[in-house]
Image (cartoon, grey):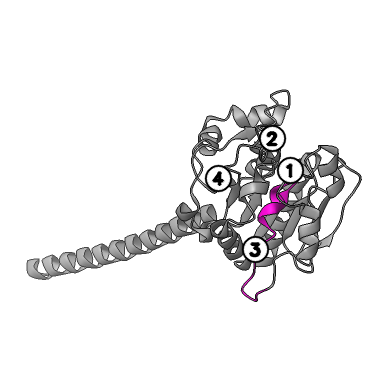
Amino acid sequence: MSHTIKIKTTLFLFLCTAFLISCNNKKNSGNSSAKADAKTETKAQKKILFVVTSHSEKGTTGEKTGYYLGEVSHPWDVLHTAGYEIDFVSPKGGKAPVDAFDMDDAINKKFWDNDSYRNKIENTKKPDEVNPDEYVAIHYAGGHGAMWDFADNTEIAEIARQIYENNGVVSAVCHGPAGLVNIKLSNGRYLVDGKKVNAFTNEEEIKVNLADVVPFLLEDTLLERGAIFEKSAPFTQHVVSDQRLVTGQNPQSAHSVGEATLKELQILTQSAK
């Protein structure tokens, strides 16, 4: 073989090798990109939005209120432990007033001592800062403050509608269902219409001497909206799930609301496979 042919052969082999390496790199790059997209998608699918009140006073009584800490911390503990990232929104944004600040409750303490989540709840998002497409569920925490600023907040109601109609889960506990009473779906029906629901009952409101202080009674209003209201004896645990809507009666139900919400999310994940 002549010297010239050897050179041409070597050059040809070099170019072929370079071409193959280039193709392989592109393939790997594509795979990496796909993996990154999958990771991003998975992360986006693992976010839940918690709604807390901005209202800090029980009518004109002079008594302070806010969100009920255990109704945030107990569902948070269940869902965060399961791998979900929790964000917080309130009607006004910023620092949310807290009620029932009980550090003898180990879960309350666990939440409050978590610097990341303590920062989140003391710097809640405003409704216009929330993208509903980022969340697979929305949870309305209770506390008497919710009775004054949840029901008529059309921005958060719209966020909840979009999450629900994106095949997401809506949950609420105690006075949190105040946020459900005016949510209307795209078909014009109330979200709670025809669904089994519970919330802080008339009897419970009477027992805490606030039936004449709150602007409306949850049990009565939910019934007016077409809900099938279920309840147990005052201050006993009661949770119901119906068509991706999870509701709990009182603070005693908060942990179980978290568990029922997780179960609904797991069902959705399985059905999507």
Upstream in sequence: badge 2 or badge 4: 2
Label 1 Cα neighbours within 10 Å, binned few <14 / some 14-19 / many ≥20: few
Q: Is 64 in front, or is 268?
A: 64
What residue appears at the point 26 percent right and 63 percent down from the top-left corner? Answer: 17
Label 4 Cα neighbours within 10 Å, binned few <14 / some 14-19 / many ≥20: many
Q: Is 206 in front, or is 132?
A: 206
Q: In the rendered image of this protein, does residue 115 appear above or below residue 191?
A: above
The residue that label 4 is drawn on is 88
Q: How far apart are marks 3 and 4 (CA)?
A: 19 Å
Q: Is residue 241 visible?
A: no
What residue appears at the point 66 percent right and 54 percent down from the top-left corner? Answer: 179
State which mark lies toward you, 1 or 3: 1
Q: Which mark is residue 61?
A: 2
Q: Give the range drawn in magenta.
A: 172-188
State the SS at label 2: loop
Q: Distance between the residues labelled 3 and 2?
A: 29 Å
